[in-house]
Amino acid sequence: MLIPNSSRLAQIKVRLGSTLKSLGLRPQLVPTEGGQGYLRFVSEDGSGSSPVNILVPDSRAGGWANCRLLCSQFTEYDVGDNGWKFFWDRGWTSDEALAAEEEEALAQIGKALEDAGVILKDGHPLKTTNEELFRAFEELEARLCLYEDGEIPIECRRENGIESLNLTDPCGQVWMIAFEEGKAIIQADGEDVEILPSKEAYKISRAVSRRIDEAVLDRQVGFG
């Protein structure tokens, strides 16, 4: 359904309603100086926003001629097994002209929204901005998947602003790796076992997996 003489917001709501609903987004027009403005897409519940923005030459007029589709480039990663996300900012923004014809322009916008997804806002309970925690998770997950006991879930937690990776190994030991002030503090059953620089993802994962290997071996030979 096209609305030839309606506002850009109305066109988006009608033509892209199902896309917006599936992403939990609503369009918002933000005027800037000189009559210009941009359309952005924010979460209905305030949890995040789309990296897609539309630069419009005249926020008071309709039509898509001379509008530009901008999209900040991010890659979304899962962190842990309890829903946490890390968004890697790739450091550049795509910029393309929107078609002047309404149906084609709206198709461009819809595809961009679907491809880009939603970026959780900083401070969201399921978002981490700690790249060192994310890298340590990747290394640790790759090591833990090798155990015959099956998958070992890793849970992300945040307490008093300190983020950590948490797991229970095949021998029942409870591990926590807390990331605090450039350090990764490794604990087993509540006791500190090693403190490493938080940027050393490989060493962190090796320190944990080495001790788990020893415990599993002891159990297999009857010492655990």
Image (spheres, rainbow, N blue to C red):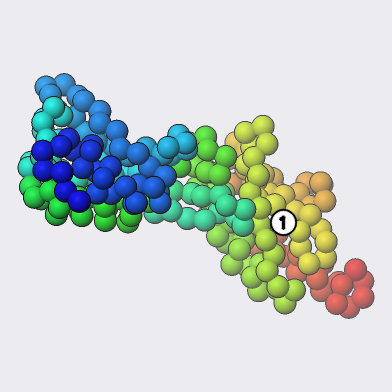
> Which secondary structure lies at badge 1?
strand
Instruction: Kindly identify the residue that appears in the image at 81 percent across and 58 percent down.
Output: 173
Residue 26: x and y in percent read: 35, 39
Is 205 placed left or right of 119 in the picture? right
* Residue matched to label 1: 167
10 Å crowding of disc 1: few (<14), some (14-19), many (20+)? some
Quarter of the rendering containing residue 53: top left
Q: Nearer the viewer, residue 106 or 183?
A: 106
Instruction: Kindly identify the residue that appears in the image at 49 percent across and 42 percent down.
Output: 129
In this view of the protein, can residue 146 be seen by the observer? Answer: yes
Count all numbered tags in the image, as a single digit.
Answer: 1
Q: Nearer the viewer, residue 129 or 9?
A: 9
Q: Identity of the amino acid at label 1?
A: Leu
Residue 81: x and y in percent read: 61, 57
Q: Is residue 183 above or below residue 81?
A: above
Quarter of the rendering containing residue 28: top left
Quarter of the rendering containing residue 7: top left
Q: Nearer the viewer, residue 106 or 38?
A: 106
Q: Nearer the viewer, residue 96 or 20?
A: 20
In this view of the protein, can residue 121 be seen by the observer? Answer: no
Residue 6: x and y in percent read: 15, 37
